[in-house]
Image: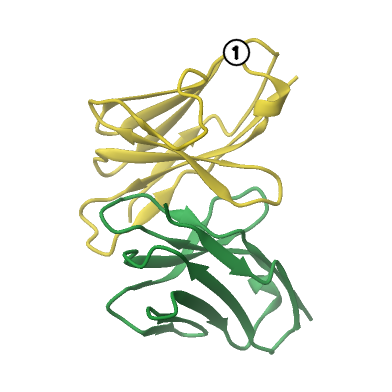
Amino acid sequence: GAVVSQHPSRVICKSGTSVKIECRSLDFQATTMFWYRQFPKKSLMLMATSNEGSKATYEQGVEKDKFLINHASLTLSTLTVTSAHPEDSSFYICSARDPRNTDYGYTFGSGTRLTVV
Amino acid sequence: GENVEQHPSTLSVQEGDSAVIKCTYSDSASNYFPWYKQELGKRPQLIIDIRSNVGEKKDQRIAVTLNKTAKHFSLHITETQPEDSAVYFCAASPSGFQKLVFGTGTRLLVSP
């Protein structure tokens, strides 16, 4: 089945620095990937839709300049948290659809736990 | 935009009992409704899904029902086991979009 790899799984960074999270589709090409944020014991909140070769589509209330998304190839999307602050600490998780799967087939990455100190 | 509500937020049952989790959605054009199971610190795992042209779907101990008129769908787990303990999320996919909008989650605890 479709596999989505996300890296790193955990990262600790200092306030003011930037952190890049990678999301890769390993056995399929994904023209679209999705980035979610999840606070402890809360639901998954869609941050943005990453579109290969074009600009990402951000959900209302998500700062584009804060959360930079790049989808330069059909198998890789990156989320960069710029000038991170403690309130950016969260679980970030990506998702992608395998277009070969007619039953929608959303697959999630393993997530990245970001801690900003 | 689409809004998905989920109830209850927590559910405790005895092993062997049935568990029911309910969700409502706001966008009548939404056409795909998956259910995910998430264990602590892990990625969500799809357990069952249903499309808007189907009223019910079953997979062993798990079933999902959809009422398009009322705009609600439910997850039914029969013969619950301790390993069913996790957080369950419903989601809806608005028509014409590829994204998923998630419910608030239900923490299910199955006691031996």
Q: Quadrant of the C terminus of chain A?
A: top right
Query: Considering only vertical position in the picture, is B12 above or below A100?
Result: below
**For residue A62, side relative to residue B79 (left or right):** left
Residue at horizontal 24%, vertical 40%? A29
**Of helix, strand and loop, which one carries label 1?**
loop
Residue at horizontal 40%, vertical 67%? B33
Q: Position of residue A82 (x, y in %)?
A: 55, 15
Residue at horizontal 24%, vertical 33%? A74
Query: Considering only vertical position in the picture, is B8 above or below A49?
Result: below
**For residue A8, side relative to residue B58 (left or right):** right
Q: Position of residue B58 (x, y in %)?
A: 42, 84
Q: Which residue is mark 1?
A: A83
Which color scheme is applied?
by chain
Chain B's colour is green
**For residue A76, side relative to residue A95 (left or right):** left
User: Which image quadrant for residue B105?
Assistant: bottom right
Q: How many marks?
A: 1
Chain identifier for the yellow-coloured part of the image: A
Query: Considering only vertical position in the picture, is A2 above or below A39?
Result: below
Mark 1, other Cα within 10 Å: few <14 / some 14–19 / many ≥20: some
Q: Amino acid at mark 1?
A: Ser
User: Which image quadrant for residue A77?
Assistant: top left
Q: Quadrant of the N terminus of chain A?
A: bottom left
Q: Position of residue A42 (x, y in %)?
A: 66, 51
Q: Chain of mark 1?
A: A
Residue located farthest toward the right when viewing the structure as drawn = B112
Q: Position of residue B97 (x, y in %)?
A: 30, 51
User: Which image quadrant for residue A19?
Assistant: top right
